Image (cartoon, helix red, strand yellow):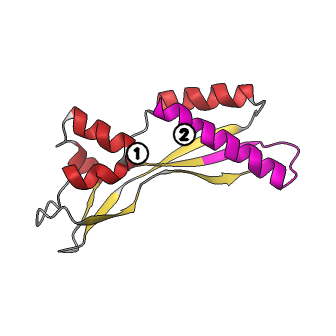
Amino acid sequence: MHEWSLAQAVVYSAIKYQKNNKLKKITEINLKIGELQQIDRDIFKFSLKQISRLKKITAKIKIKTEKAILKCRICQHQWSFSKILKKLNKNEAEYIHFIPEIAHTYLRCPKCKSPDFKIIKGRGVWIDSIK
């Protein structure tokens, strides 16, 4: 399960941060999830809760989503992933979920139809802060 492995990486990173900074306790972990990852938040939250419990982490975990913005390298047009996501079929969306770089296979600039674009923001899962 993709969400489980991402949750595991978050918890282990937090533990490493705690050890490296000689913290007695972590009280809060603030995460950001890029929209392009299309994480199932319920599964991700459940995974975080279970792994945290196993590792005896009692921190409050807050999650924010960062909207994905794409920019065409040809015409410089910018657009949001959420608008184009509606045009993808279920399989295409699933492929992008597991391998976001594959988006170039299924997405085109809405203005010039080029597949040559860059992801400006909204990709990945990262720890924004730890308290």
Kind of residue at badge 2: Leu
Instruction: Write the residue at 58% across / 28% down.
Output: 47
Kind of residue at badge 1: Gln
Q: CA distance from mark 2 to mark 1?
A: 11 Å
Q: Judge whether residue 128 is colored magenta.
A: no
Q: Which mark is residue 37?
A: 1
> Along the horizontal axis of the image, is 105 left or right of 15?
left
Quarter of the rendering containing residue 61 = top right
How crowded pointer 1 is (Cα within 10 Å; few <14, some 14-19, many 20+) is rated as many
Instruction: Write the residue at 73% across / 37% down.
Output: 59
Image coords of residue 126 (percent x, y) = 56, 51
Placement of 79 over or under 7, stated as above or below: below
Quarter of the rendering containing residue 85 = top left
Quarter of the rendering containing residue 50 = top right
Sequence-wise first label, 2 or 1: 2
Image coords of residue 9 (percent x, y) = 61, 42
Q: Which residues are magenta?
A: 1-30
Query: Which residue is denoted by mark 2 in the rendering?
Result: 6
Quick check: marks 2 and 1 in contact, CB under 8 Å? yes
Image coords of residue 39 (percent x, y) = 43, 38
Q: For numbered disc 2, what is the local secondary structure?
A: helix
